[in-house]
Amino acid sequence: MNVIAIDDEPLALKDLVRTLHGVMPACEPLTFATPRAALEHARREPVDVAFLDIEMPGMSGLSLAKELKDLHPDLHVVFVTSYSQYAVDAFALHATGYLLKPVHVEDLARELTFIYEHRAGNPRKRVRVQTFGGFEVFVDDAPLAFKRSKSKELLALLVDRHGGSVSAREACALLWEDAPHNASQRSYYQTIVADLRSALASAQADDVLVKAWNSLAVNPDLLDCDSYRFLEGDPAAINAYRNDYLPSYSWAEFSVGAFHKGARPSA
């Protein structure tokens, strides 16, 4: 992995590198005393993880993090600072971690685990759902095909509810907004429900859908969903968010606030 560390205090930088070696002996981070030097490097070379001090002359670590993430959108940023008051601003930038000096081995190990742990011990879920940057569903890595766009939107609505049920009338009101709720609309709704069930059944993933009298839901335990992982504090999902939750659907605006809070990985 390509790791950089930036701090204008030589002793603090040396201490961080020593601690990093204690956690990952094979890791050889490149160190920089100024944000400018780090940026010059990042413009030429890939960077996977950046450890940044916050209070530095010329450019703050918060500003540097934004510049680095513009260059490398999937970059993991871990702030290393003597001050706790910047935490809210740091996680608004979707930082992966926030460490207070002096850095302790166990704290650094936890942050690195957040970055590189691939959910060890959890069985791989067959159905993967993308809600950031557009709604897509994959079953065994193959795109799920829908006959009708409204069937796809209905599934997006159910994913947004995170296991909560949606009645037929409520779904119609959201899917067709100001259109009158009448017999024709109810009939077409049943058509798209049937299409959704058929699409899932053709991929042998119909167990994802939970159907009850006059309501539908999804079983979130069967979904590997980027927005679910974001809300659980998964740093990879947090890094992937670009203020683009279900951008094609106006009803999704009611859920956007949860992502603007910048969820913090739990300890």
Image (cartoon, rainbow, N blue to C red):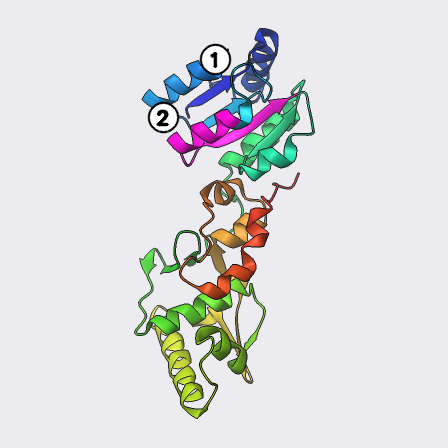
Which residues, given as a range, are shown in magenta? 63-81
Q: Nearer the viewer, mark 2 or mark 1?
A: 1
Q: Is residue 54 above or below residue 154?
A: above
Q: Is residue 67 magenta?
A: yes
Q: Position of residue 120 (x, y in %)?
A: 52, 43
Q: Is residue 205 above or below residue 106?
A: below
Which residue position holds label 1?
Answer: 32
With 8 as the anchor, is 241 left or right in this view?
A: left
Few, some or many C-alpha atoms within 10 Å of disc 1 (few <14, some 14-19, many ≥20)? Answer: some
Locate the C terminus and report the quarter of the image it occupies: top right
In this view, the residue farthest toward the top is 10
Instruction: Answer yes or no: is residue 136 visible.
Output: yes
Considering the numbered disc 1 on the image, is that residue within a helix, a strand or a loop?
strand
Few, some or many C-alpha atoms within 10 Å of disc 2 (few <14, some 14-19, many ≥20)? Answer: some
Which residue position holds label 2?
Answer: 46
Q: Residue at x 53, y 23 (%)?
A: 51
Q: Is residue 143 magenta?
A: no
Considering the numbered disc 2 on the image, is that residue within a helix, a strand or a loop?
loop
Q: Residue at x 44, y 69 (%)?
A: 155
Q: Nearer the viewer, residue 148 or 35?
A: 35
